[in-house]
């Protein structure tokens, strides 16, 4: 990477932040504050701030915010994570990543409300009970297809569902990318996994989603070298 790649973000009206990605470092240049220049080894971790931005935390406790609205944000974040996966390949260890507590809490609330509604409606109206029961079927299908956790071990990416596990070999994975999903409730950082012989998978509402990406990329890099 001889010439830097620059990404820009209009954080506020008439205020723009620039991120210059060089071969060995990144330069953060906000209009309204002092610029921060740091190399890859100075990055302590990257924290996702749901619905708005990520935060790059440096060893000296300085923080570099990057909003989801940054120009080509998924490309920027992937560029950073690919570099970290390359220089931190010795840090890989088998670990399990779970859905965020907030998301699990919302799911529990939905299930509890639906079950309570079914219990209350049964003695009142069989018609109402039947309607609520019919509405619960697609919800049950959704829960069956929603992984509770994902585990990265030395050979597989393992999806843990309510009643089953699915293991995917790393050589089945063609590519992984970041995506920002936007709906009426805001923006969500997600990861898209492209597979050789299966339907592509989108992962969202995952704790430590950036760390998950980096650890997964370390294993994908190893697989490429072996091939």
Image (cartoon, rainbow, N blue to C red):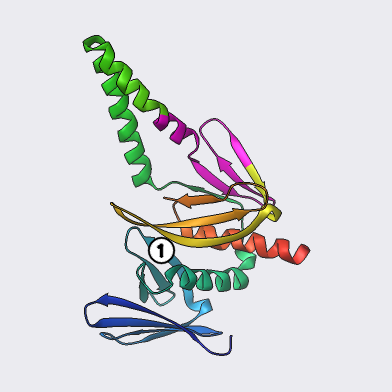
Q: How dense is the environment of label 1, judged by Cα within 10 Å: few (below 14), some, or many (20 and up)?
A: some
Q: Give the percent coordinates (x, y) of residue 71.
A: 39, 74
User: Compared with residue 133, is residue 82 higher up or lower down, i.e. above or below?
Assistant: below
Residue farthest top in this picture:
123
Residue at left offset 28%, top offset 52%: 184
Magenta region includes residue 144: yes
Q: Give the percent coordinates (x, y) of residue 44.
A: 47, 70
Q: Residue beneath label 1, please? A: 47
- Is 190 positioned to the left or the right of 150 in the image? left
- Is 192 positioned to the left or the right of 8 in the image? right
Tell me which segment is drawn in magenta.
138-166
Residue at left offset 42%, top offset 70%: 73
In-front residue for pair 8/83: 8
Residue at left offset 31%, top offset 27%: 114
In-front residue for pair 103/2: 2
User: Compared with residue 69, is residue 13 higher up or lower down, i.e. above or below?
Assistant: below
Q: Give the percent coordinates (x, y) of residue 163.
A: 54, 30
Residue 226 location, quadrant? bottom right
Residue 58 location, quadrant? bottom left
In-front residue for pair 13/47: 13
Magenta region includes residue 197: no
- Quadrant, the C terminus: bottom right
Residue at left offset 53%, top offset 62%: 177
- Is 211 positioned to the left or the right of 70 in the image? right
């Amino acid at each position: 990477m001889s010439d830097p790649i620059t990404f820009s973000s209009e954080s506020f009206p008439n205020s723009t932040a620039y991120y210059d990605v060089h071969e060995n470092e990144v330069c953060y240049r906000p209009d309204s504050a002092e610029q921060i220049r740091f190399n890859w080894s100075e990055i302590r971790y990257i924290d996702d701030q749901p619905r708005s931005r990520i935060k790059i935390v440096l060893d000296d406790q300085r923080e570099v915010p990057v909003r989801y609205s940054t120009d080509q944000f998924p490309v920027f974040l992937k560029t950073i994570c690919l570099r970290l996966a390359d220089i931190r390949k010795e840090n890989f260890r088998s670990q399990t990543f779970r859905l965020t507590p907030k998301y699990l809490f919302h799911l529990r609330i939905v299930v509890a409300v639906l079950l309570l509604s079914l219990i209350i409606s049964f003695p009142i109206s069989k018609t109402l009970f039947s309607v609520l029961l019919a509405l619960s079927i697609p919800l049950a299908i959704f829960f069956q297809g929603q992984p509770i956790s994902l585990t990265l071990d030395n050979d597989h990416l393992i999806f843990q569902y309510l009643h089953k596990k699915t293991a995917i070999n790393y050589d089945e994975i063609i590519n992984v990318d970041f995506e920002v999903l936007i709906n009426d409730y805001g923006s969500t950082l997600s990861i898209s996994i492209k597979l050789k012989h299966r339907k592509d998978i989108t992962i969202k509402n995952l704790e430590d989603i950036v760390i998950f990406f980096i650890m997964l990329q370390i294993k994908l890099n190893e697989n490429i070298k072996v091939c």
